[in-house]
Amino acid sequence: MKLNIKDTFSKELPSDSNQINSRRKVFEATHSYVKPKPPKDPKLVHTSNQILNEIGLDSPDINSDEFISIFSGAKVYPKTRPYAMAYAGHQFGNWAGQLGDGRAINLFEIEHNNKRWALQLKGAGETPYSRQGDGLAVLRSSVREYLCSEAMFYLGVPTTRALSLMLSGENVLRDMLYDGNADYEKGAIVSRVAPSFIRFGNFELFAARNDIKNLKKLTDYTIKYFYPELGKPSKETYIMFFREVANRTLKMIIHWQRVGFVHGVMNTDNMSILGLTIDYGPYGWLEGFDFGWTPNTTDKQNKRYRYGNQPNIGLWNLLQLANALYALVEEAEPFETILNQYQTDFEAKSLQMMRSKLGLEIQDENDAKLISDLEDCLLQWETDMTIFFRLLSNYKKGFSDKGVDIVYDAFYKPEDLKEAILKQWKVWFKKYDQRLHKEILSATDRKAKMNRINPKYVLRNYMAQLAIDEANKNKYDLINELFELLKKPYDEQPLNEKWFAKRPEWARHKVGCSMLSCSS
Ligand code: AMP
Ligand code: MG
């Protein structure tokens, strides 16, 4: 197994001089060297061939002992030195101080086909940043991260990737619902891949300590490797950098809104500086369309991270990043302008995204009203978001009376639908029909276009749970099946129609399907 190692983060930025793996506060360093904990009996469960090729490996490589050793943490790749990153963050709106990679260990960076990739293990043992945790991850949460991050990639949503899923051969104690009922679960390790895993929180850590020297080093490094088009470091560059991060963050969140993804724990330590979806924990997918929904039981009270609030939280998190970068610019106005622009852009991009979901090409001044009327309908009666938009592409212009029939399968308990609600839907379909008459696209073209925006298959919460239940019994066929299914989320897959279905009733209140905690 030959990798083109090109470490930059650990080589160019200051490391922690203390190399003992004890839990502590780390100052004036971006990372601490630490060795992964060799797992008892590592076993490969799945690999993503696409990312395998991206990093310059081939299918035969995964059968080597070396692959298992390196990506389970049993061995360290020659001439590399694993490390954990230091970062801080705001959790649920409150300053949390130093956090850091408590159970992620970066292995190395590689270059392949002019692309840079950082590889890290999640669940490979404790680090100086582990605080009260054990540094481990369980199979349940690892299957969820592994499947979802790859599914997001194929949906076209900016995301970190996953290379492999392994069992560690150890049992890990977890109190899944934080209710005092701890139990042992199988331990697992995911190897994650991204150009970089730097988060908003890495910048916040130095800013909070007024360590401007290292804040500048980290920012200059990030621009040099990941925003090189911005040029040499200067106040202007830092402002442009912030603008670009704001743009990418917004773009990512608009994608989330489009596909119905709810991250669940948008703390600033879970915000990538590259605008990638990162840290798949208590995330979930909208089934019934609901702005107020959050999968995260830890957030049940305030619902800070609910679906409809994600764009606002993106803005709030960017404000924390602006506060951190302020020290390099010492002027508030440019940041304020960018944050205001985010709000304007959000309105415009969100509208454009919704137009595309409805198959509308041209812009009409009444579109915002048409869309909010639709949202009103969707909120009146539990309606499956994915199924609704997918079926809507079958709508035939001039047949608004048939609208409800076309999307009927998207309604939960359709037999109980009240007359008044049906009437509201009929009114909406009339308006939609009138609006479609302003379009020039043929029905076939509209359908094809809509089906490239509205996925047919997403990783519904219960689907991941079924795969986890099987995996806990050492059966991995379903992981494989879902992985393949989600590689083509926009395609018709006649053999997979069973996954184009509403959430079954048994999953409505089941742990792991509708209720998730941060315990992982
Ligand atoms: P999260 O909410 O999963 O993004 O985690 C927040 C912080 O807790 C990060 O610093 C994680 O590294 C750390 N953390 C989460 N779970 C564990 C664990 N089992 N062991 C050590 N650190 C953890
Ligand atoms: Mg995290």
Image (cartoon, grey):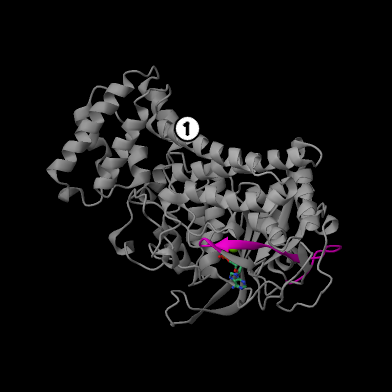
* Location of residue 240 (image quadrant): top right
Q: Nearer the viewer, residue 414 or 13?
A: 13
| Figure check: 104 above or below 327 | below
Mark 1 CB in 8 Å range of ligand 2? no
- Residue 375's image quarter? top left
Question: In the image, is residue 88 part of the stretch drawn in magenta?
Answer: yes
Q: Is 17 on the left-hand or right-hand side of 101?
A: right
| Residue 152 within the magenta-colored segment of the rendering | no
The answer to whether residue 198 is seen in the rendering is yes
Residue pictured at 37% horizontal, 23% vertical: 365
Inspect this view and state whether residue 1 appears.
Answer: no
**Label 1, residues with CA under 10 Å away: few <14, some 14-19, many ≥20:** few
Q: Quadrant of the N terminus?
A: bottom right
Residue 137 image position (x, y, % from top left): 58, 71
243 to 305, vertically: above or below: above
**Residue 237 position within the rendered picture, expressed as x and y whole percent measured from the top left:** 75, 39
Q: Residue at x 75, y 35 (%)?
A: 229
Query: Mark 1 is on which residue type?
Result: Ala
The residue singled out by tag 1 in the image is: 348
User: Which residues, given as a range, are shown in magenta?
Assistant: 74-94
